[in-house]
Image (cartoon, rainbow, N blue to C red):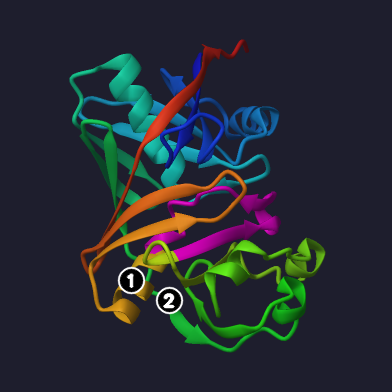
């Protein structure tokens, strides 16, 4: 099968978040797709099957299939529009999170994703120790959103992943603060899904966008994810939907031999 590796939410190679994109004629078994994702050892591997007027799309970390992934969806659109059909300006994907669309405008790709509004919740007892930082408040959606005091605190986080794993009912941990050079910053950790730190996370912004839109009183925002690789996301709140924009660059083209 044709296989690509795309760096997403960046203009530069070796930055942003890497996604594997596998182009299939028909679905492989779940077991084989999981093994491919494990072998690729990237934060996500996307599997894409063309249908008549849309594409089926699934996402796998090295250890589990997940229900929503932003950077691998954007990466899949980048591959389809640059290597399979350069006339594409919009793609519709059918996924475990329903119908998702991606719009291409020159080099900018914009995801239309569901909003996942977080609800205030009690701070878990061991969370402060696990993160080593003062926690202002926490909020629950699919992931646990953790508000801390400053961009500097987000940048300098050194989590204890073994302690985070003890919070085994949480899929991912979104740590966020108001930005100094942008509207808001974040980092994302998912040790229970086989990813200690995800470099740049589209799906977490389904929660971050409504959260910061309400806090800042604005619908259009610029966000940065402060991992070592780093990434930039162009965000807009549409109520029950969010738009997440970014760029991408291809690192690798090849074939997987089964």
Residue at coordinates 18% horizontally, 20% vertically from top-left? 87
Task: Name the mark on residue 141.
Answer: none
Residue at coordinates 31% horizontally, 31% vertically from top-left? 55
Q: Sequence-wise, which precedes: disc 2 or disc 1?
A: 2
156 and 50: which one is in front? 156
Q: Position of residue 36 (x, y in %)?
A: 63, 27
Q: Quadrant of residue 39?
A: top right
Q: Of circles 2 and 1, which is in front?
A: 1
Please tell me whether residue 193 is drawn above or below residue 156 in the rendered image.
above
Q: Quadrant of residue 217?
A: bottom left
Residue at coordinates 42% horizontally, 28% vertically from top-left? 249
Q: Which residues are magenta?
A: 185-206
| Callout 1 crowding tier (Cα within 10 Å): few <14, some 14–19, many ≥20 | many
Please tell me whether residue 255 is drawn above or below residue 200 in the rendered image.
above
Q: Quadrant of the image for the C terminus?
A: top right
Task: Name the mark on residue 210.
Answer: 1
């Amino acid at each position: 099968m044709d296989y690509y590796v795309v760096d997403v939410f960046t203009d530069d190679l070796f930055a942003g978040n890497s996604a594997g994109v596998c182009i299939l004629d028909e679905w492989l078994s779940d077991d084989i797709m999981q093994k491919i994702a494990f072998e690729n050892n990237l934060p996500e591997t996307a599997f894409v099957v063309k249908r008549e007027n849309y594409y089926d799309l699934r996402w796998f970390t090295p250890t589990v299939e997940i229900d929503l992934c932003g950077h691998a969806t954007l990466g899949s659109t980048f591959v389809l529009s640059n290597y399979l059909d350069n006339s594409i300006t919009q793609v519709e994907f059918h996924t475990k999170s329903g119908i998702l669309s991606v719009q291409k405008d020159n080099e900018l790709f914009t995801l239309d994703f569901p909003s996942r509004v977080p609800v205030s919740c009690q701070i878990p007892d061991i969370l402060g120790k696990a993160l080593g930082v003062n926690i202002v408040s926490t909020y629950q959606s699919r992931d646990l959103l953790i508000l801390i005091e400053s961009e500097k605190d987000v940048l300098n986080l050194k989590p204890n992943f073994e302690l985070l794993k003890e919070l085994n009912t949480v899929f991912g941990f979104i740590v966020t603060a108001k930005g100094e050079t942008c509207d808001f910053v974040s980092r994302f950790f998912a040790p229970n899904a086989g990813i200690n730190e995800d470099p740049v996370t589209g799906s977490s912004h389904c929660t971050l966008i409504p959260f910061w839109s309400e806090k800042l009183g604005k619908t259009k925002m610029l966000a940065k994810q402060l991992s070592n690789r780093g990434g930039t996301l162009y965000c807009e709140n549409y109520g029950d939907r969010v738009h997440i924009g970014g760029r991408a660059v291809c690192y690798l083209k090849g074939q997987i031999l089964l």
